[in-house]
């Protein structure tokens, strides 16, 4: 567990700055925004993906963010989100922050990861009555290269409009993504993928638990029994057919104050022996969410 609580060497060779955002799929986007507000998270105005049937609300921190992703027009392209949400809500994927999408693509190719070519995408942010277009370039990876999880790199071309002081101030004191845990019945392929993604210097391992220190945030890979020991609130199926992102830790300024806010909102939670606030999936649209001291 100690390995999952420390920061390590950023992946300079791959032009990565760490975790950019965590994607949380929700079946009802407005309900998801309202529930996360009840948990103490402010969000941006709604963003509509250009040419797609999906939209999001983003919970912004200084260097990373959470993306609440839902469908607003099922008749349009949803990038398989409709199929995924038929099965479950929760963490659907991770995006890594790239300084240069083309350089990341070239480095991943050299590492044998078979990335796609960088693609330009955009979304319209409905702020102050006007639609502001946010532009970015993504580099996708096949699941065969990531050990079975959805993971891609994202280079933001218009970062300034994404963060306003009021969007960064959260009543629960949230400041940053701390870690994200993947449960898998076969850790070896994911461990190998993490080494190829970030380099051997960014990896620590204890028994079958592997931690990739991305520079901003830690990605933890663990067998189901270890994932449950680390995250007792996680919903981990007894027989995992494929790796699953099951838990998310967010750093807060003061877990006690976060707990006080949740009590006011009548949100069910527990406290860990070291004082972390543990929120069950039924309160978070499928995420075992932990608020830990930043």
Image: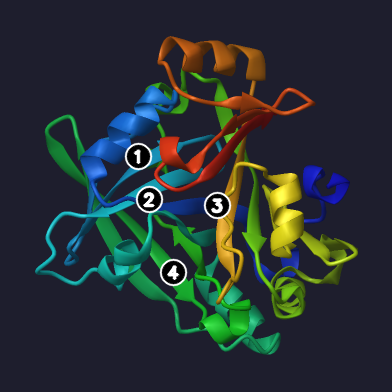
Q: Position of residue 248 (x, y in %)?
A: 59, 45
Res 127 seen here: yes
Q: Which residue is mark 3?
A: 235
- In the image, farthest residue toward the front: 238
Q: Residues within 10 Å of mark 1 (few under 14, many from 20)?
A: few
* Vertical position of residue 256 compared to residue 35: above or below: above
Residue at image location 56% in from the left, 59% down from the top? 245
> What's the distance in space between the residues labelled 4 and 3, CA to CA?
30 Å
Q: Nearer the viewer, residue 49 or 243?
A: 243
Q: Which residue is mark 4?
A: 138
Mark 3 and mark 2 lie on one chain; the one further toward the N terminus is 2
Q: Which residue is mark 1?
A: 161
Mark 1 and mark 4 lie on one chain; the one further toward the N terminus is 4
Q: Which residue is mark 2?
A: 158
* Vertical position of residue 38 compared to residue 78: above or below: above
* Vertical position of residue 166 compared to residue 260: above or below: below
Q: Position of residue 112 (x, y in %)?
A: 67, 89
Residue 241 picture quarter: bottom right
Q: Secondary structure at mark 2?
A: loop
Residue at image location 57% in from the left, 89% down from the top? 114
């Amino acid at each position: 567990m100690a390995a999952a609580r420390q920061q390590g060497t950023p992946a300079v060779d791959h032009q990565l700055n760490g975790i950019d955002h965590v994607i949380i799929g929700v079946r009802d986007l407005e309900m998801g925004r309202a529930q996360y507000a009840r948990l103490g998270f402010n969000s941006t105005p709604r963003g509509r993906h250009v040419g797609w049937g999906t939209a999001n609300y983003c919970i912004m921190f200084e260097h990373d963010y959470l993306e609440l992703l839902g469908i607003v027009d099922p008749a349009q392209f949803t990038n398989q989100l409709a199929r995924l949400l038929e099965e479950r809500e929760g963490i659907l994927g991770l995006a890594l922050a790239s300084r240069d999408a083309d350089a990341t693509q070239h480095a991943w190719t050299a590492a044998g990861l078979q990335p796609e070519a960088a693609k330009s995408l955009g979304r319209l942010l409905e702020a102050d009555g006007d639609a502001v277009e946010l532009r970015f370039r993504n580099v996708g990876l096949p699941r065969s290269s990531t050990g079975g999880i959805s993971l891609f790199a994202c280079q933001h071309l218009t970062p300034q409009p994404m963060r306003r002081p009021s969007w960064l101030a959260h009543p629960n004191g949230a400041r940053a993504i701390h870690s994200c845990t993947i449960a898998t019945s076969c850790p070896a392929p994911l461990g190998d993928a993490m080494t190829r993604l970030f380099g051997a210097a960014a990896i620590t391992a204890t028994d079958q638990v592997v931690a990739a220190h991305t520079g901003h945030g830690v990605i933890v890979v663990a067998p189901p029994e270890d994932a449950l020991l680390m995250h007792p609130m996680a919903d981990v199926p007894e027989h995992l057919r494929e790796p699953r992102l099951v838990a998310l830790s967010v750093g807060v300024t003061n877990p006690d104050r976060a707990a006080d806010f949740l009590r006011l909102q009548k949100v069910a939670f527990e406290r860990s022996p070291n004082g972390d606030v543990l929120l069950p999936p039924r309160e978070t649209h499928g995420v075992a969410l932990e608020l830990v001291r930043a």
